Image (cartoon, rainbow, N blue to C red):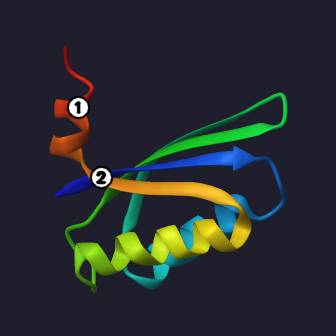
Amino acid sequence: MRAVVTVIGTDRTGIIYNVSKILAENNVNIEDISQTVMQDFFTMIMLVDLKKMTVEFNVLKESLEAIGESIGMSIRIQHEDLFNAMHTI
């Protein structure tokens, strides 16, 4: 089972650290990552493997959203199937 994590907000130091720390603490592996800064906006998409995750999906989702709020970023996670369905015409 895989998921897509999206991170959007004003660029600042420590964004990748904060997101990857939550993932590592919950045994979620980052398979692929793409990030860019457009003017002052930071955007990142991560494809993560949930097979060995040590918490329920909703707990991980809430943890990522909470860290996002604390650092002023929008962080969302969606199961890969849902993400693909939403972005297929």
Quarter placement of the N terminus: bottom left
Image point (38%, 65%), residue name: 29
Name the residue beneath numbered marker 2.
78
Relative to 87, is 83 above or below?
A: below
Measured from the top left, where is residue 76 in percent x and y?
43, 55
Q: Amino acid at mark 1?
A: Met
Callout 2: SS:
strand
Image point (40%, 75%), residue name: 62
Relative to 47, is 48 above or below?
A: below
Q: Is residue 1 left or right of residue 9?
A: left
Q: Is residue 82 left or right of residue 74?
A: left
Mark number, residue 86: 1
Measured from the top left, where is residue 81 in percent x and y?
15, 42
Decide: marks 1, 2 in contact (CB < 8 A)? yes
Image point (37%, 69%), residue name: 61
Callout 1: SS:
helix
Q: Is residue 84 left or right of residue 9?
A: left
